[in-house]
Amino acid sequence: MADRKTYYITTPIYYPSSNLHIGHTYCTVMADAMARFKRLQGYDVRFLTGTDEHGQKIQTKAEDAGLSPQEYVDGVVAGIKELWKTMEISYDDFIRTTEERHVKRVQSFFMKLWNTGDIYLGEYEGLYCKECEAFWTESQAKDCKCPDCGREVLPAKEEAYFFRLSKYADRLLELYDSNPDFLQPETRRNEMKAFIRQGLEDLCISRTSFSWGIPVPLNEKHVIYVWLDALTNYITALGYSDEPELYDKYWPADVHLVGKEIVRFHSIIWPAMLMSAELPLPKQVLGHGWLLLGGEKVSKSKTAKGNDVIDPVVLIERYGVDALKYFLLREYTFGQDGNFTNEVMLRRMNFDLANDLGNLVLRTVTMIEKYCGGVVPEAKTNDEIDDDLKNIAVSAREKVEQNMDKFAFSAALEDIWTVVRRANKYIDEKAPWILAKDESKKAELDTVMKNLAETIRIVSVLIYPFMHTASDEIRKQLGLWYADVRWEDAAEFEMMYQEKVKRGEALFPRLDIEKELAELSDIADELAKNKAAAEAEDPVDKAIAGSVPLKLKEPIVYDDFDKIDFRVGTIIRAEKHPQADKLLVFKVKMGSEVRQVISGVAEDFTPEEMLGRKVIVVANLKPRMLRGLESYGMLLFAENGKRCEIVTTSAPDGEAVN
RNA sequence: CGCGGGGUAGAGCAAAUGGUAGCUCGUCGGGCUCAUAACCCGGAGGCUGGUGGUUCAAGUCCGCCCUCCGCAACCA
């Protein structure tokens, strides 16, 4: 057998600092669909995913949890693998950067770059937090405060190895220009070009400030810092440097599928390192967009936001893997950000899957059972409508291929759905229930049933890369259980003969969207609570996790706040208002000025209790008459409707409060 | 002047190399009863953010303006 063409596709290796969310799922689902598509087309596919397990953050997290870093990542990685199993991700290899095969090959790659002279020892300068023993960049450490502990960070230096990234700027620009496909979509390429033009600095590739990493071969004080460790996974997983069989077969990769935020690393650092090592470059880097929640980026710390449940496991339990995959691939256009809400998801599932596809299969199988004794008949007639259906069904395959070549999953699925919709329309045009009433129309009725069966068979092939379980179920119902799914069959119309159909359960049950929304909302609340309970070792973290937003008045801007003049004062006289039960009349000394302020706190405090107390006064409030006496300001109290506390301070009288 | 991306029917999104602005949902009206209250047909609804240019022709190319949003070296 002649060697089949190979296809090597990768996802990023994910950072297991906690469980993965719908965004990671989105990326991996795309890679999986592509891998399955290429396999169906006959390619020899290799699909790699994995985890990037080293670094400061992991080390710290593990310490907090009282585990060794390895124990910690083992736990998280087990969860990730479980998720991919649930999602039916068909990866061929899962690489962990803590595996021996990776460690030794990274060291070998490091030495390769060292020997070319592209690595040198220098000094890393950054903002250092002593407490956390971590370096931060200026943008991370806002206002010179450590983003983790909030303490001050100070400029510091440490010895570090550097890679001569700057040397490759011109070659990278040339790569983009001579090979526009290398980096897609185009907007990402423009960004990278601009980034390179503003000047590349050499890249720090080692650290001494933490130890959870791969040791630098020449110098055990250092561990290899993120990029050289992580990016090389794409070749170490293939056996680079010591087991050439897979490497020779699959490298260079056809596609590195990555999120837009790490395009830079894959399209600048990675090719530069490969150039230095004189290895072939991947054929393509594709940067996809993000799923947004209410316009914000999804983050690992959220399993749900508002009412939207974004824990893929929950969604799969309720709606199934196929429905979730379909939604992710159909709803969003590759490369662009898209908004995730429960509602758009449920609508997609209902309209496309339940109403269009599921219903088509059901009504067809039902009619074949009813009108043809459950056996797919032969086509004995033909007219223009039949031809139109056949043409649309048979020509979809090529359109899907064209769109898949561009990673336009959404458009590819749309192509498939034009077939589904045409089939539904075909039923309406042919009205088989009328044909069935007239014995003389039996031949035409048979044709309709046969053509529908063939069309659905084609659909079952076309959707296979996206929803193989649904595809299998359709084929089972059509009596095609005996036949393998073959891509080329999607271009053939006459393939079925006397298959025995069998009506099954609804492929995609129709969802009551209102009801689902309400239930998902409850689940979101539940998840938030569980999360708070489960994760809280540190009482502050617990508080943060359990935090529920306060119900507040309309937001104000700083200028509004700045208009208020708060002053510190001392109550030097306190007495009851002669004409009001609830009011106390105070004389408040604020530095040079003494003024009268009336407060409605007579039910909470006696004049004696208030005398001599330090208070905070809203000093520029317009004076107001209260039962015949003027009040020149207000005092601050904390209150909950029942009980009242003075807001106080020990600062000198007259001072401004901000 | 840091870099970059958007602004298209009520909503959410599409529109290689410029050539009658499409899709899904919603809405209004109709059809059908095989089917998961589903399916099919038709209508209404857009000066494609604004403005000035290039062109026989601009959502698409160029200038300026308004506006929303990402990124700035460990978040898919």
Image (spheres, rainbow, N blue to C red):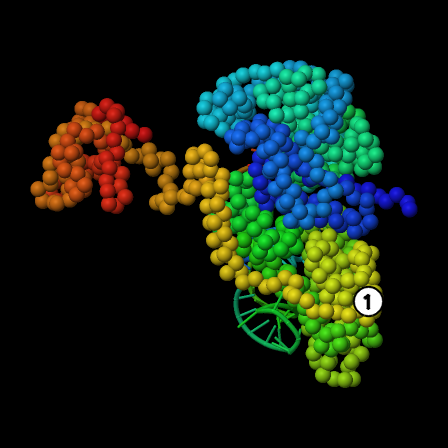
Q: Is residue A178 visible?
A: no
Name the residue: 43% across, 42% down: A546
Q: Is residue A652 visible?
A: yes
Name the residue: 64% across, 45% down: A82
Q: Secondary structure at mark 1?
A: loop
What is the quadrant of residue A224 in the picture? top right
- Mark 1 is on which residue type? Met
Q: Is residue A335 left or right of residue A141?
A: right
Residue on which disc 1 sits: A496
Above or below: residue A233 compared with residue A91: above
What is the quadrant of residue A222 in the picture? top right
Which quadrant of the rendered structure holds the C terminus of chain A?
top left
Above or below: residue A250 compared with residue A529: above
Above or below: residue A530 compared with residue A399: above
Residue positioned most to the right: A1
- Could you say where residue A597 lies in the image, as x and y percent from the top left? 17, 36
What is the quadrant of residue A395 in the picture? bottom right
Name the residue: 77% across, 34% down: A238
Name the residue: 54% across, 63% down: A512
Residue in the foreground of this view, choosing between A411 and A282: A282
Q: Is residue A629 left or right of residue A53?
A: left
Residue in the foreground of this view, choosing between A182 and B61: A182
Would you call the spot at circle 1 few (<14 residues within 10 Å), some (14-19), or many (20 or more)?
A: some
Residue in the foreground of this view, choosing between A89 and A633: A89
**Total of numbered circles in the picture?**
1
- Could you say where residue A507 lies in the image, as x and y percent from the top left? 66, 62
The chain under label 1 reads A
- Could you say where residue A348 lies in the image, as x and y percent from the top left? 60, 57
Residue in the foreground of this view, choosing between A539 and A121: A539
- Could you say where residue A275 lies in the image, as x and y percent from the top left? 76, 26
